[in-house]
Amino acid sequence: MLLVVAAALVDADGRVLVQQRPEGKPMAGLWEFPGGKVEPGEVPEAALIRELGEELGIRTEAACLAPAAFASEALGERHLLLLLYVLRKWQGVPEARHASVLKWVRPLELHALAMPPADKPLIGLLEALV
């Protein structure tokens, strides 16, 4: 089981932040929600706060992370469990530290983006929440 956390950062205009996976990484070129793997002994919220700092250079607190949904997807010989949180409050300006580029899009526009299989089922939920 591979436990992964991700955040749907929502700005004041109701747009969601996605990042494009860089060349040389698995699923390069696909758009995804920022986040990453939960390390052994780490709770999901702490992992997401750490990942957002590493990937985007932003800071937030666990109280700002609203659990929204999860996705379950076979991933080769492993199984991915993706926990998605909605985040509306953070400090700093997101920058693409580990991604090719960042993009702010309306939830409806996510349907047109090439995204990993685990992220696709989460789009409808975001449309309802945002």
Image (cartoon, grey):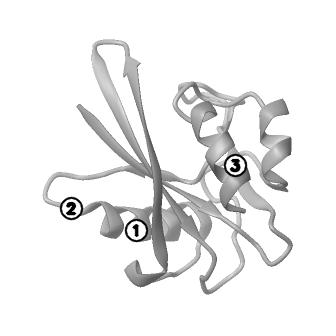
In this picture, residue 77 sits left or right of residue 30: left
Q: CA distance from mark 2 to mark 1?
A: 10 Å
Q: Which mark is residue 118?
A: none
Residue depicted at x 76% and y 73%: 11
Horizontal and vertical percent position of residue 113: 79, 33
As helix, strand or loop, the secondary structure at mark 3 comes to: strand
Above/below status of 114 relative to 11: above
Mark 2 neighbour density, 10 Å: few (under 14) some (14–19) many (20 or more)? few
Q: Residue furthest top?
A: 76
Which amino acid type corresponds to the residue marked 1 in the rendered image? Arg
In this picture, residue 26 sits left or right of residue 1: right
Q: Which residue is mark 1?
A: 50
In this picture, residue 105 sits left or right of residue 10: right
Residue depicted at x 41% and y 24%: 73
Horizontal and vertical percent position of residue 15: 81, 62
In the figure, residue 31 lies in which quadrant?
top right
**Nearest to N terminus: mark 2 or mark 1:** 2
Which amino acid type corresponds to the residue marked 3 in the rendered image? Gln
Which amino acid type corresponds to the residue marked 2 in the rendered image? Glu
Q: CA distance from mark 2 to mark 3?
A: 24 Å
Mark 2–mark 3 contact, CB under 8 Å? Answer: no
Q: Which mark is residue 42?
A: 2
- Identify the image quadrant of the N terminus: top left
Q: CA distance from mark 1 to mark 3?
A: 17 Å
- Report if residue 118 is visible in the image: yes
- Identify the image quadrant of the C terminus: bottom right
**Nearest to N terminus: mark 1 or mark 3:** 3
Mark 1 neighbour density, 10 Å: few (under 14) some (14–19) many (20 or more)? some
Above/below status of 68 relative to 116: below
Q: Which residue is mark 3?
A: 19
Mark 3 neighbour density, 10 Å: few (under 14) some (14–19) many (20 or more)? many
